[in-house]
Image (cartoon, rainbow, N blue to C red):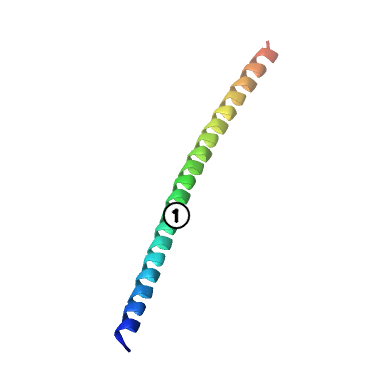
C-alpha cells in the first residue's frame, strides 16, 4: 500500500466513524424522546384511573342518597 492509499483509507474510516457517531446520537435522542412520551402516557393513565375511582365513589354516594330518599 502506498501513502496515498493509506491516507484515503484513513479519510474514509474517519468519515464512516463520524457517520456512525451521528446515527448513534440520533438513535439516543429518539430513545430519550420515546422514554419521555411513555412517562407522559403513564401519567395520563394514572390520572384517568384516579378520575375513574372518584367517579365510582361519587356514583356510590349518589346511589346511597337516592336509596335513602326513596325509603322516606
Residue 38 or residue 33, whichever sits in front: 33
Residue 60 showing in the rendered view: yes
Is 69 situated left or right of 38 in this image?
Answer: right
Describe the element under mark 1 as helix, strand or loop.
helix
Is 69 situated left or right of 5 in this image?
Answer: right
- Indicate the position of residue 69 as horizontal and vertical percent values: 66, 13
**Image quarter hosting the N terminus:** bottom left
Looking at the image, the residue that sits furthest to the right is 70
Looking at the image, the residue that sits furthest to the left is 3
- Indicate the position of residue 53 as horizontal and vertical percent values: 55, 32
Residue 71 showing in the rendered view: no
Residue 33 or residue 12, whichever sits in front: 12
| Number of marks present in the image shown | 1
Residue at image coords 44%, 54%: 31
Vertical placement of residue 2 versus 35, above or below:
below
Residue 43 or residue 69, whichever sits in front: 43
**Image quarter hosting the C terminus:** top right
Residue at image coords 33%, 76%: 10
Residue at image coords 35%, 73%: 11
- Indicate the position of residue 17 as horizontal and vertical percent values: 37, 69
Looking at the image, the residue that sits furthest to the bottom is 1
Vertical placement of residue 51 versus 24, above or below:
above
Amino acid at each position: 500500500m502506498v501513502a496515498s492509499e493509506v491516507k484515503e483509507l484513513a479519510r474514509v474510516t474517519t468519515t464512516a466513524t463520524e457517520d456512525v457517531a451521528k446515527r448513534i446520537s440520533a438513535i439516543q435522542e429518539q430513545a430519550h424522546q420515546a422514554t419521555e412520551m411513555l412517562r407522559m402516557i403513564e401519567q395520563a393513565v394514572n390520572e384517568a384511573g384516579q378520575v375513574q375511582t372518584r367517579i365510582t365513589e361519587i356514583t356510590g354516594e349518589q346511589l346511597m342518597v337516592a336509596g335513602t330518599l326513596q325509603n322516606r
